[in-house]
Amino acid sequence: MDVKPMKWLAIVNPVSGGSNTSKQMEQILFEVKGFVFEHQITEYPGHAEELAEASSDFDGIAVVGGDGTLLEVLKCMDLERQTLAIIPTGTGNSLARDLDFSSISRSIEAIDDKNIVYIDLMRVTFRDEGGFSSQYYSASTIGIGYPANLVEVGNRFFKHLGKFCYPVAATVKSVFNNKFKVQLGYDGGNLESKSLTGLLVNNTRHAGNFKTFPGASIDDGQLDVMELNAGFFKQNLHNISLLSKKPFYAAATLYRMKSLVIKLRKPQFLMIDGEIFPDIMNVEVEILPRRLKCYKNGRTAS
């Protein structure tokens, strides 16, 4: 019996990853048009959400962009019915790295090979200082303190550096690596007061360019949490260790869990998959096991 081919929509962020992506976009679109029924170009922040919300006629969505574009799409796509493909053109590409997409051609090959996997998502609900609440589905990384601050600086000042954007921003922000007061509740337990320089909650091994959680898995049904409490020297030693092929130093405490409650004493930046949300006071994170159907590279790199 013949199987009806999937009907694909490509949502394309032409400015994802900075100027290098813009120069390559014509070739990228040529490759993508080989399998998609239609492609739409995002024109402003939040446009990918709108396009995903209007995509009910499509069986799959191909995200041509980075982690931030993916975050918008996940918020509004039909997770029960639609399949996701990633064509990574962003700065960090955390999930794409965990799916073994070393290049755009590898990601397109995965679609041709029909190598489908089911991966976890993190449901993150947060409230800002004014009491406004929002909810997103994160595929890779949630950060407060140092991790959020370095992404904010990287996006604002160093985006033109491409893959070096976040490593450079990590060094710059480590000079002003201040502590903040927070209450944390793990897996429904009592809130515990702590003083930290940063907090990371991950679904992937990678947080941007950094292989921060080598033992993490995108389908293990667990949140990987890192509590950071390090000054300039220790934080940079930690960063260098993560960027090396063989990590040799850690300035953090690691946990694994299924849910997390975060209550901040003062408003902070919240980073979700490379996007910054300001003045956040409360955050709740829950793992959703095998919630997303997507493609993974199944070929051995040559």
Image: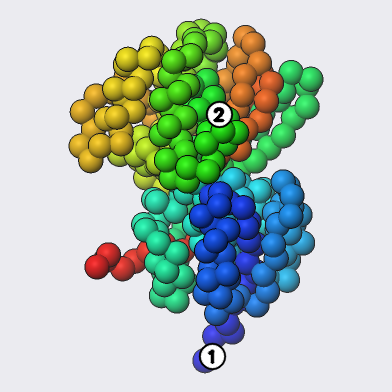
* Disc 1, SS: loop
User: Which quadrant of the figure has residue 223?
Assistant: top left
* Residue 263 in picture, x, y percent from top left: 60, 16
Mark 1 or 2, nearer chain start:
1
Measure how far apart labels 1 and 2 are at the Cα level.
52 Å
Q: Is residue 42 left or right of residue 255?
A: right
Q: Is residue 229 left or right of residue 241?
A: right
Q: Nearer the viewer, residue 250 or 3?
A: 250
Can residue 106 be seen from the camera position used here?
A: yes
Task: Residue 161: give its label.
Answer: none
Q: Which of marks 1 and 2 is in front?
A: 2
In the rendered view, would you say 138 is above or below 73?
above
Outermost residue on the bottom side: it is 1
Residue at the (64%, 11%) spot, across then down: 266
The residue that label 1 is drawn on is 2
Query: Residue type at mark 2?
Result: Val
Residue at the (42%, 40%) spot, across then down: 164
The residue that label 2 is drawn on is 153
In the rendered view, would you say 91 is above or below 25?
above
* Disc 2, SS: helix
